[in-house]
Image (tube, helix red, strand yellow):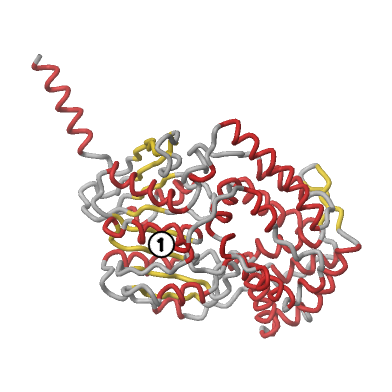
Amino acid sequence: MRTWIILILAVLLCACNTSPNEVIDGILEVPENRNDSNSRTLKLVYKVLKAKKPDSLKAPIVYLQGGPGGATLIMEEFWKDHPLRNDRDIVLMDQRGTGASEANCIEMGAAIFDMMRQDLDNAGEINALKTIFSECKETMKNDGVDLAGYNSRENAADFEDLRKALGYKKWNLFGPSYGSKLGLTIMRDFPNSIRSAVLAGIFSPETDFINKYFRNFENSLLSVLERCEKNEDCNNRYPNLKERLLKTMKKLESDPLDIYYEGKPFVLNPQDALSLFFMSLYNREAIANIPVLIEAIENRQFEFLVNALRGIENISNIINFSMSNSVLTYEELPFYDEAAMVESLKQSEIAVNIPQYSDLGIELMNNWHPYRASEIENQAVVSEIPTLMVSGGLDHVTPVSNATKALKHLKNGYEVIFPDEGHSLFNPCFFQIAEDFLNDPTQRPDMACSSLSNPIEWNLAISSK
């Protein structure tokens, strides 16, 4: 008997004294739809990367992935040896309907990328997507999926349940892109659970996302071209970029590029080219290659284009489009203004040369599911929780104006702008500011490094024609 007591005590001691690099794996069971008493249960997979200092008492960080629909557990390697893990637990959980957390229709990304291979106009793409989406919805119907449960409100409640299950009194939110919207939703619905929030690429509830989607993209792209023009070396190497871009896009309408990509044909048309430019605006390294991308399409240099297409294919395999569709349909579609969208496209310099690029799939969203958010999902979050909001000056998805607007309602909010960065902001200066803020959220952190000039290092390599 004494031997068994000793063994039990040993197990308890081991459970309390974690090793410096311990990773705890777990499954959180939650209702699929908290508004339905008969809702089925979802199993959400999480990991806790314990702080390397086992005696640290600092509040943990919960990482909120972007998307919507992005897998989260794939970030384990990124956070494993990150300085922020030295004295804080890092909590990762695949959000409902993504990654390992009962993801729906995981083949949709590959199907959409295969559709892109074809030379379809906008109407043709919409019809192809209708088929892909219909097949997914039929599968989910057969599996008993309740699409009413796939939104930021339910998502936020999942993380509150996780906090309770892990026994944390409070934690710090860390959310980029859609993760910032999820973070703000958690701040709104569960304010007593949050010590502080670090949010980047701000996608706040009141953001006019659909109506301004294309114009934000175009403004960022043209701003990049303008920067090249103002840089003597870049302008000498790539003169008249804007004119060449518009001319090249127009030519693709009647003369698309036939590329051989990963063993199969790929027809690069105007919509595909826009997707390549969109992907290139995410980070400064890719931004530096945008002049090369224009030239590659112009001169039909397939090797560079093949490498660019890999980025799109990789993203299509990471994002769960079912979850993405559900969130956007529920939270953004109710506040879509068709007249504003039409007016926005009329002012576009790029869309005017691509007449078919005028339907952003509103019909697809309308048909995805019938659930629509109430007005609260379109209202700014009012909070006193210390919040650090970080934006890139070249961000094509969530421009600086999003953060500026949201901060008006955050009493203890601080704004950081990186003028020469895009949507992806994970640079050393950002993390230093974030660490200082997390250590003392009551004080404005030193942001000096963010204001240092860090111009784009353009790719000036001479390519063969």
- Give the farthest residue toward the right: 254
Residue 173 appears in the rendering: yes
Residue 89, x across and y down, in percent: 31, 50
x then y, percent, for residue 390: 45, 70
Q: Which image quarter holds the C terminus? A: bottom right
- In the rendered view, would you say 25 is above or below 218? above
* Camera-nearest residue between 249 and 362: 362
Residue appearing at x 47%, y 80% in the figure: 452
Task: Give the residue drawn at x 47%, y 49%.
Answer: 75
In the image, what residue type sits under mark 1? Leu
Identify the residue shown where x is 24% and y is 56%: 58
On screen, residue 390 versus residue 49, left or right, reads right
* Residue where numbered disc 1 is placed: 184
- Tell me: residue 376, above or below residue 393: above
Locate residue 383 relative to residue 228 in the image: left or right: left
**Residue 160, horizontal then vertical, whole percent:** 34, 49
Residue 87 seen anywhere in this rendered image of the structure = no
- For disc 1, the neighbor class at 10 Å (few under 14, some 14 to 19, many from 20) is many
- Residue 416 occupies quadrant: bottom left
* Residue 77 x, y percent position in the rendering: 46, 47
Q: Nearer the viewer, residue 461 or 94?
A: 94
**Label 1 secondary element:** helix
